Structures are given as structure tokens and as C-alpha cells.
Image (spheres, rainbow, N blue to C red):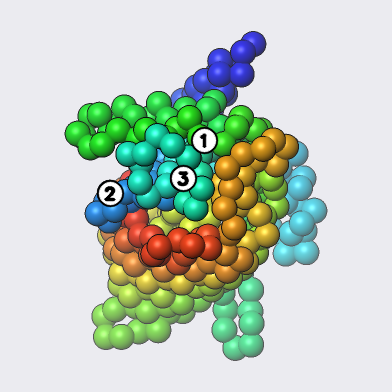
Amino acid sequence: MKPDCLCRTVAIALLALPLSAPAAPAAEHDPWGTLTLQLENDRLARTDRHYTHGTRLTWVSETGKFIPGWADTFLNALYGFVGDGTKKQIGFALGQNIYTPEDISRAALIPDDRPYAGWLYVGLSLHATNTETIGAHEFDVLDTMEVDVGIVGPQSFAEDVQSVVHEVIGVGRPNGWDNQLRNEPGVVLLFERKWRPRSPFMLGVLEVDAIPHAGASLGNIWTGVNVGGTVRLGQGLSVDFGPPHIRPNLSGLASFDSAQPFAWYLFAGAEGRWVARNIFLDGNTFADSHSVSKERLVGDFPVGLAVVIDRVRIAFTHAFRTREFKGQSRSDRFGALSVSWKF
């Protein structure tokens, strides 16, 4: 099978996973999963450069449902000391990220700006939530373990997607895709832990909490460590662990709790990352390609609003990202929209 056919086959198979699962029970209070569509784009923040677009479709099971035997064995081995208190979930994802230099009108290589690159991938994730007491305070602790497998280069179809979208919305055609990174299979292993207070601070009728997190990633796509947190103000904060974003931006779980008919919150986050490898700046691992000298420390600062109404969550984010490579003229920003449906 040709590589491009293989990529299309994997993508179609992943999209079909939720559709092939057992039909949802008739009772509204017994859903079997959450489907989330995430769109991130720099034009939502009135820019057109660097991390220019991201799309991710994710399905996450309800707690304890559709956990295969191998995943249950792994999570039991990891969390056996807490007995039956662990809430287990499994997730699947299909995503694509697109990166370009600032000036997409030039066909020639731009040596001092980031390479053209795309990343098409499928993901498998396991999630475990426990209760932990630290000092005098109780926390809901969420652990996320994820493996993403995909391809960088022309077979990511990033050029095709961006060219079509730019033609549809009537903006300049990107002319430098001949200089993009070469085809390279990629894999990323990710682990992250979040701590959510079980008793938020009350400010009149409003709740306030802070969710710190720490994590690490390993692979030829990204390798590094991250630490940060999110502060939220609203009502019904136990509904989730913050809104989902496309990594490496700090992200909450793509699932949420629909026990409350209505919840909302404003949020602001900050994350610092120490970057050992970023293929979209460092260039190909096994072939000569365009590259730039990356910054080792990168910060993300998202702000936004999330609303949950019955079985639907909608979140909008405006994210700021510090300079990612040496010689970058200015920091970046982009907008993000996520819509989650529990069914």
C-alpha cells in the first residue's frame, strides 16, 4: 500500500471508531462518551504565521466504559493501591497541525524563519482520576497518558489543506511549500498530571479554583517537560479540568461531567516548557532539511471562556505564545474553539 493511501486509511479507521461502538443507551443520564472537535487558527487572533492551524477530533469514553483488558490491567497495576476509587477512561484522536513562516508569499526558502511543516497523527490516550489529600486539602488528580503516531512532511497533506482553505476564504496562497520538511514517521509519548481542588474558594455565588499541572513528552516530534496552571472563575467548576487544547498548548480533558445542567467559567492559564526537541524547528531527524535554532524555554498564556449546557460544552480561547526560535521577530498568538458533545 502506498504511504499516502495508508495515511488516509488510518484516518478513516480512527474516525469510524466512535461510530462502530455500541449504540448509546436510551436514557439521557447514561451516555457512553464525549466527542470533541477542536479548531485552532492564527486568523482567529488576526495573524497568519508560524503555528497557523490545528484540527483535532477526539472521542473519550465515559468513566469505566469500553476499557479493553490490556488498558484495565495497565491502569490497575499503576493505581492498584487506591483500589476501586480510580475512574478510568480511554480516548482516541485524529489531528493535523500546520506550520509556516511569517511571509507565505515567497516561494524561495527563508533561512531565518521557521520551516513549512505539517503533522498528521492518530492518538490513543488513557485517563485516570483519583482523590488525593495534600496537607489539609483534597484534590481530584487527573493523570493523562497518550501516544500519538503519525507523519511529518508532504504526506501530512498540510499543503493541500492550507491551499484549499486559503482559496475558499480568499487570502494569499502559500507559495513556499516546496521547502517543507521531508516525510518522516513520528511518535510522541506524553504524561501529564493535574490537581483540581475538591472545594473551590467561594466569592459570593462564584467559585474560584487553581489547577496546577506538570508533564513530560518524549519522541522524535516533541521532547521536553512542562509545568503550569489554570485559574478559573465561574459556577460549577467540578464539571471538568479546564477546556481542551491541542498540544503542546496546555490542555484539559476532552471529556466533561454532564451531571450539572449548566456551568460556566472564565479562565486564564500559564505554562512554561523546556524544549529538548521540536521537529518543526529542529528539522528532520534522519534527513537534511530546513531548520532554525530553537528557544529552549517557551511560554503559553491562554485566556478564555467555557460554557456547559446539558450535554454540550463550548470553549473559546485566545492564546499567546512566546518566541519559539532565535531571531523570531515577535511572539505569536492564535484563537481556539472547541465543541464537545456527550452522547
Farthest residue to the top: give it. Answer: 1
Q: What residue lies at 66% left-to-right and 54% top-to-bottom? A: 277
The residue that disc 2 covers is 43
**Secondary structure of the residue carrying numbered label 1:** loop
Q: Amino acid at mark 3?
A: Ile
Q: Kindly tell me whether residue 329 is visible in this rendering.
A: yes
From the viewer's perspective, is the residue at label 1 or at label 3 nearer? 3
**Secondary structure of the residue carrying numbered label 2:** helix
Mark 1 crowdedness (10 Å alpha carbons): few <14, some 14-19, many ≥20: many
**Secondary structure of the residue carrying numbered label 3:** loop
Q: Position of residue 126 (x, y in %)?
A: 63, 48
Q: Position of residue 204 (x, y in %)?
A: 27, 85
From the viewer's perspective, is the residue at label 1 or at label 2 nearer? 1
Q: Position of residue 280 (x, y in %)?
A: 56, 47
The residue that disc 1 covers is 180
Q: Amino acid at mark 2?
A: Arg
Q: What residue lies at 41% left-to-right and 40% top-to-bottom? A: 55
Mark 2 crowdedness (10 Å alpha carbons): few <14, some 14-19, many ≥20: some
Separation of marks 1 and 2 at Cα, in angstroms: 21 Å
Q: Are marks 1 and 2 in contact (CB under 8 Å)?
A: no
Instruction: Note whether 238 is above or below 72 in the view shown.
Output: below
Q: Kindly tell me whether residue 123 is visible in this rendering.
A: no
Q: What residue lies at 58% left-to-right and 59% top-to-bottom? A: 294
Say which of 37 and 327 sits in front. 327
Q: What residue lies at 65% left-to-right and 33% top-to-bottom? A: 184
